């Protein structure tokens, strides 16, 4: 009886220790959701305009190459009053990926076109997003 009790206690201690260790290894995920003012379509990707908390307009560029399975970006189309907006995901304090929630109708006021200009390539050659809110 004593051996069984000691064995059960040891098993619970071991399992408890494993659970604590597993929790410490979980990445810390942070998500920020922001309304979009305008999404400008370009042959290289999207330029997104959004309103910062200081009431200034922020912008960022998302290349089309990010929109693939397992990529850094996703485009979700819909038709609710909440659209358009984006959610940016940080893992352990570093940019992980972004999801753009856009109106499904490209004729909607939230969509626009960005004309080609010199220097466009460098704007869309980004590896990460460092946004101000």
Image (cartoon, grey):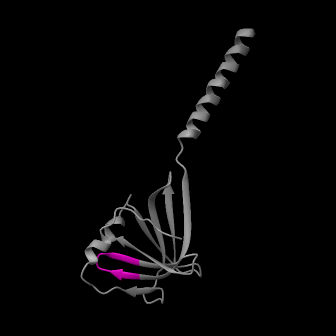
Q: Residue at x 67, y 25 (%)?
A: 12
Which quadrant, please, contains the C terminus?
A: bottom right
Q: Main secondary structure of the magenta part?
A: strand
Magenta-highlighted residues: 40-47
In the rendered image, residue 116, in percent from the top left (x then y), is placed at 27, 84
Q: Residue extending furthest right?
A: 1
**35 inside magenta stretch:** no
Report which quarter residue 107 is drawn in: bottom left
Q: Is residue 119 above or below residue 73?
A: below
Q: Nearer the viewer, residue 90 or 84?
A: 90
Q: Is residue 67 above or below residue 58?
A: above
Image quarter of the N terminus: top right
Residue 38 appears left or right of 34: left
Residue at the (62%, 24%) spot, across then down: 14
Outermost residue to the top = 2
Q: Residue at x 56, y 81 (%)?
A: 55
Residue at the image point whose x is 58% and y is 78% from the top = 82
Q: Is residue 2 left or right of residue 61?
A: right
- Where does residue 42 sit, x and y in percent of width and height? 32, 80
> In this rendering, is residue 129 above or below 81?
above
Front residue of this view, candidates 78 and 42 = 42
The x and y percentages for residue 26 are 54, 44
Question: Which percent across, then down, holds residue 130?
Answer: 44, 65
Q: How many marks?
A: 0
């Amino acid at each position: 009886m004593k051996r069984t009790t000691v064995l059960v206690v040891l098993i619970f201690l071991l399992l408890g220790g494993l659970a604590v260790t597993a929790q410490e290894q979980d990445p810390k995920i942070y998500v920020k959701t922001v309304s979009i003012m305008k999404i400008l379509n370009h042959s290289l990707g999207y330029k997104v305009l959004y309103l910062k908390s200081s009431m200034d307009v922020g912008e960022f560029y998302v290349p089309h190459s990010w929109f693939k399975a397992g990529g850094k970006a996703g485009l979700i189309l819909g038709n609710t009053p909440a659209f358009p907006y984006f959610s940016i995901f940080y893992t352990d304090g570093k940019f992980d990926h972004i999801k753009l929630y856009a109106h499904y109708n490209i004729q909607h006021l939230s969509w626009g076109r960005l004309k080609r200009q010199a220097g466009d390539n460098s704007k869309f050659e980004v590896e990460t997003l460092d946004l101000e809110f």
